[in-house]
Image (cartoon, rainbow, N blue to C red):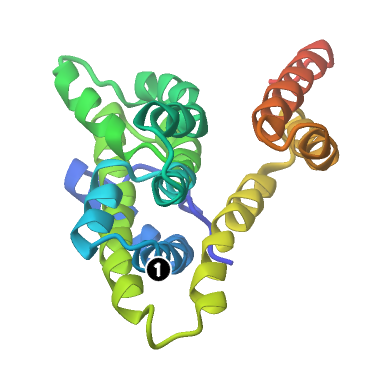
Amino acid sequence: MSQTAPAAEAPFGSPRAAFLGAAREALGTPALVLGASYVGFGSLVKVSGWTAAMGLFSTATGWALPGQVALVELYAAGASLASIAAAVTLTNVRLLPMTATLMPRLAAPEMPRWRLYAAAHLVAVTGWVASMRTCPTLPPAERLPYLLGFSGILWVTTMLCTLAGYFLAGSVPAYVTLGLVFLNPIYFMLVLSTDLANRRRLLALVFGAVGGPLFHLATPEWGLLITGLVAGTLAYALGRRGGAA
């Protein structure tokens, strides 16, 4: 699997080069896996009775697959607007700490804050991991262009693949297209596991893998949220106690 960050920890040379270099990185494994997952989402949109425009709008504005799947499924089930909003919010709340930790790394002297606010829409797991690894090695002027190049390509790719999945829904077996959705969490786990030298990250993965099934059996509705809270908190506490960076 190709890595999501440059092998050489060196500046690209200019903001434009950082943008283009990040875009080239994203066009490898990240675009392939996320694109395949959104083909599955497009198929889900079709079988749920949504229009192609609705699916495209969801990807363009929401761009967080778990929340989008929850939105489509709950809407199809006739859930209330308040219930759908609460479910999507809880599903996507993980993006808040990710954004809070990444944005300060992207700031450059005299950069208008509105640029960071606009770029926050492109914060997702894949781009976050790549940016957190690479941006600290870059001059401040190249950091925001790196995120925009990497995540921007993925954003466009997922919109195109949403449409592709929608129109392929009738020609490809449903279990194939819908199954593609599950490539996403597997890929995220593999991406995060590439840096197991970080003790907290390793502990979080282990605690999550062990606790996830147990909490799901105890409370399917809240199991995932509880797993993230417990695993992350324990990993942070034990990592800090052990002197992890």
Q: Quadrant of the N terminus?
A: bottom right
Look at 63% across and 57% down and name the residue there.
186
- Which residue occupies the foreground of this view, 165 or 99? 165
Look at 27% across and 60% down and name the residue there.
159
Counting every numbered tag in the picture gives 1
Is residue 111 among what the camera can see?
A: no
x, y (%) of residue 195?
Answer: 67, 43
Give above or below for 24 relative to 115: below
x, y (%) of residue 28?
Answer: 42, 67
- Which residue occupies the foreground of this view, 222 or 137? 222
Along the horizontal axis of the image, is 245 left or right of 87?
right
Q: Quadrant of the C terminus?
A: top right
x, y (%) of residue 29?
Answer: 48, 66
- Which residue reaches farthest front? 78
SS of the residue under disc 1: helix
Along the horizontal axis of the image, is 144 left or right of 244?
left
| Residue under label 1 | 47
Is residue 100 among what the camera can see?
A: yes
Q: Which residue type carries mark 1?
A: Val
Instruction: Tell me where residue 236 sits by quadrant.
Output: top right
- Which residue occupies the foreground of this view, 242 or 88? 88
Give above or below for 150 relative to 121: below
Give above or below for 69 relative to 93: below
x, y (%) of residue 45?
Answer: 36, 62
Along the horizontal axis of the image, is 213 left or right of 15?
right
Density class for disc 1 (Cα within 10 Å; few <14, some 14-19, many ≥20) is some
Look at 47% across and 44% down and name the residue there.
70
Along the horizontal axis of the image, is 103 left or right of 111?
right
Look at 22% across and 50% down and name the residue there.
57
Give above or below for 114 relative to 216: above
